[in-house]
Image: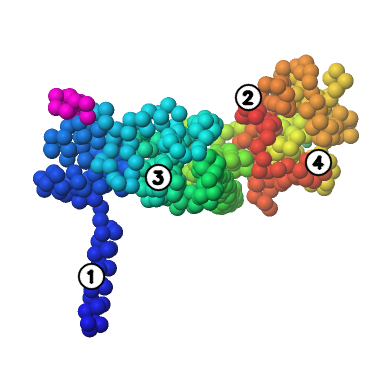
């Protein structure tokens, strides 16, 4: 024979083997059923259920084939087997179909072949297969052990193993024949399927082999485990071998489950790390965004400051009639600017910065109004301008204030008090400085004297009065009114100011103050977290009204926003930390 022919024959044989190997009796059965060949379909589907007894779909399909063949009892058993394997009836096109089908078959089976139901489920008995008969089913149902006579197997011991391994279901079958592992495997599958054991094991042995059926362990594992006990059983210790196999199956399954759990735990742990990383990256992103936005807002802020300086510089050249409008515009812009600056310093979220930006925009609008006035344009809101049109009265506006100043005649918006010595002053005479009180930074106004003292490095002092053995800062003393008392009490001469104490002392005093014998201007609020001033207090407005603080920016153009003395001998204020609001403008 020529080689080519041999090769062709080999190829053809190989192809046949291949097609046989990949043959799917379930699919073939279905196709035959669709083609109306019900007998062939039933044969194929029977084969499918034999090869894969746990396949509910095969059993379900078989029920239809039997039904067409009017084998209603067989159809009913096939349908019920499917239902036992998969109680969710996932094999049916709709779960309700199962109930309908079974009910219909019960009716038909009852009228035709009564009694067939009692027959245990089986196909044509195969020569190598022991039949699944009634006594076998009965014994398995009661004890889980079926041992054919003539075998030296301790049924009681196996029964106790079964009890021990609960809730895992285990069954032992021992046949007194020489069935090989292939048929034993089929038998084990058949029994497991019959009893609907999904999470459990059926172990079958003969005098020549041992096999196990399980849905939770794969065939390789089952084969390996049976191989391990085979020598023991070959040596005659059937009971020991079966017991070992049962325990091995359960232990292997537990180990696998544990591994799965460990994997799951690892996955969960990994997710935790991921979530943590996500939170962290969000924080980093937030910080970056904040930094970027802060830079943008800072830029806008310094532009406002230079524009305000421009307005201030242009003021002297402005027509007298316009000066008031310009000045007011600058003042308004300053108020917005100061508010924005406070927000920027304390900003925790983008929302804070958005608010700050809005304030800066408003400040910009104020400045535009001032510019329009400078350039002789009619302000768009002429009514508003008219209202402020006549400039406020500034008695001796360009003259330094002093003991003779009539403070009643000075508008509130132009009045101020030195935070330190309490000297009443025009705002234009005061310089904003930043101090730290218990870690909280505040901008306050300083008179020229105190400004110089602080700038030269002297620790700042503050006027305080002895009250009940303690120092009370001047603004917390309701008997003291700087406008009325500062000069009349001879405070004009600094050498007489024996009641100035260092700010640090006051600082501590704020903290230690636990007996608020007065209610004026401040006191406790909600536990003790520092001394809080009510924002509506008039002295507070005098030394730290926002408008007052901002209107004095021009005194310190070098850094545009006042001089900071943080860390210069007293508290290192963390500009970025929130903390208690010293001025009580928020809930702290
Ligand atoms: Zn002062």
Q: Which residues are magenta?
A: 103-116
133 sits to left or right of 254: left
**Disc 4 secondary structure class:** loop
> Which is more foreground, mark 2 or mark 1?
1
Marks 3 and 2 in Cβ contact (< 8 Å): no
288 sits to left or right of 482: left
Q: Counting other residues with Cα less than 10 Å from the Cα at mark 4, is it few (<14), some (14-19), or many (20 or more)?
A: some
Marks 1 and 3 in Cβ contact (< 8 Å): no
Q: CA distance from mark 2 to mark 4?
A: 28 Å
Q: Along the polypeptide, which appears first: circle 4 or circle 1? A: 1
Q: Along the polypeptide, which appears first: circle 2 or circle 1? A: 1
Q: Along the polypeptide, which appears first: circle 1 or circle 3? A: 1
Q: Along the polypeptide, which appears first: circle 2 or circle 4? A: 2
Q: Along the polypeptide, which appears first: circle 3 or circle 2? A: 3
Nearer the observer, 462 or 532: 532
Q: CA distance from mark 2 to mark 1?
A: 102 Å
> Which is more foreground, mark 1 or mark 3?
3
> Which is more foreground, mark 4 or mark 1?
1
Marks 2 and 4 in Cβ contact (< 8 Å): no
Q: Which residue is mark 2?
A: 536
Q: Which residue is mark 4?
A: 570
Q: Which mark is residue 177?
A: 3
Q: Counting other residues with Cα less than 10 Å from the Cα at mark 3, is it few (<14), some (14-19), or many (20 or more)?
A: some
Nearer the observer, 574 or 56: 56
Q: Which mark is residue 12?
A: 1
Query: Seen from this angle, which residue lies furthest top?
Result: 517
Quadrant for residue 86, please give it: top left
Q: Is residue 31 visible?
A: yes
Query: Seen from this angle, which residue lies furthest bottom?
Result: 2
């Amino acid at each position: 024979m020529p080689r080519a022919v041999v090769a062709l024959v080999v190829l053809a044989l190989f192809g046949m083997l291949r097609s046989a190997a990949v043959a799917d009796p379930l699919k073939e059965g279905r196709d035959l059923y669709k083609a109306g060949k019900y007998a062939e379909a039933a044969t194929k589907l029977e084969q499918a259920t034999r090869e894969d007894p746990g396949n509910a779909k095969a059993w379900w399909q078989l029920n239809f084939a039997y039904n067409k063949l009017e084998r209603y009892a067989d159809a009913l058993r096939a349908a019920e087997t499917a239902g036992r394997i998969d109680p969710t009836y996932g094999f049916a096109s709709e779960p309700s179909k199962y109930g309908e089908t079974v009910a219909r078959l019960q009716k038909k089976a009852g009228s035709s072949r009564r009694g067939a139901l009692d027959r245990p489920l089986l196909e044509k008995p195969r020569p190598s297969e022991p039949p699944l008969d009634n006594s076998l089913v009965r014994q398995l149902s009661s004890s889980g052990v079926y041992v054919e006579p003539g075998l030296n197997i301790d049924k009681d011991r196996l029964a106790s193993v079964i009890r021990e391994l609960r809730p895992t279901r285990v069954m032992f079958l021992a046949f007194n024949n020489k069935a090989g592992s292939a048929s034993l495997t089929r038998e084990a599958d058949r029994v497991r399927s019959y009893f609907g054991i999904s999470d459990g094991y059926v172990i079958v042995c003969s005098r020549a082999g041992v096999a196990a059926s399980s849905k939770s362990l794969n065939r390789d594992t089952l084969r390996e485990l049976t191989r391990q006990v085979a020598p023991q059983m070959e040596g005659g210790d059937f009971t020991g071998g079966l017991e070992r196999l049962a325990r091995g199956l359960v232990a292997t399954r537990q180990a696998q489950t544990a591994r799965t759990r460990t994997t799951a735990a690892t996955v969960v742990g990994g997710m935790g790390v991921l979530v943590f990383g996500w939170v962290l990256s969000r924080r980093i992103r937030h910080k970056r965004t904040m930094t970027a936005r802060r830079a943008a807002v800072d830029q806008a802020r310094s532009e406002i400051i230079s524009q305000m300086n421009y307005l201030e510089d242009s003021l002297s050249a402005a027509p007298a009639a316009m000066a008031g409008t310009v000045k007011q515009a600058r003042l308004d812009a300053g108020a917005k600017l100061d508010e924005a600056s406070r927000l920027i310093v304390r900003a925790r979220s983008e929302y804070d910065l958005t608010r700050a930006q809005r304030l800066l925009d408003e400040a910009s609008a104020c400045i535009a109004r001032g510019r329009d006035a400078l350039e002789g344009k009619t302000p768009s809101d002429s009514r508003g301008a008219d209202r402020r049109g006549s400039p406020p009265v500034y008695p001796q506006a360009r003259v330094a204030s002093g003991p003779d100043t009539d403070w009643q005649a000075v508008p509130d918006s132009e009045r101020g008090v030195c935070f330190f010595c309490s000297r009443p002053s025009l705002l234009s005479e005061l310089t904003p400085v930043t101090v730290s009180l218990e870690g909280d930074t505040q901008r306050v106004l300083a008179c020229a004297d105190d400004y110089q003292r602080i700038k030269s490095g002297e620790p700042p002092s503050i006027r305080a009065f002895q009250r009940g053995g303690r120092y009370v800062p001047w603004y917390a003393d309701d008997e003291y009114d700087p406008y009325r008392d500062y000069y009349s009490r001879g405070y004009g001469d600094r050498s007489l100011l024996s009641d100035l104490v260092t700010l640090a002392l006051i600082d501590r005093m704020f903290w230690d103050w636990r007996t608020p014998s007065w209610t004026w201007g401040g006191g406790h609020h909600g536990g003790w977290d520092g001394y809080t001033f009510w924002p509506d207090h008039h002295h507070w407005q005098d030394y730290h009204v926002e408008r007052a603080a901002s209107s004095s920016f021009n005194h310190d153009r070098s850094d545009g926003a006042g001089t900071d003395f943080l860390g210069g001998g007293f508290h290192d204020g963390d500009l970025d930390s929130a903390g208690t609001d010293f001025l009580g403008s928020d809930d702290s």
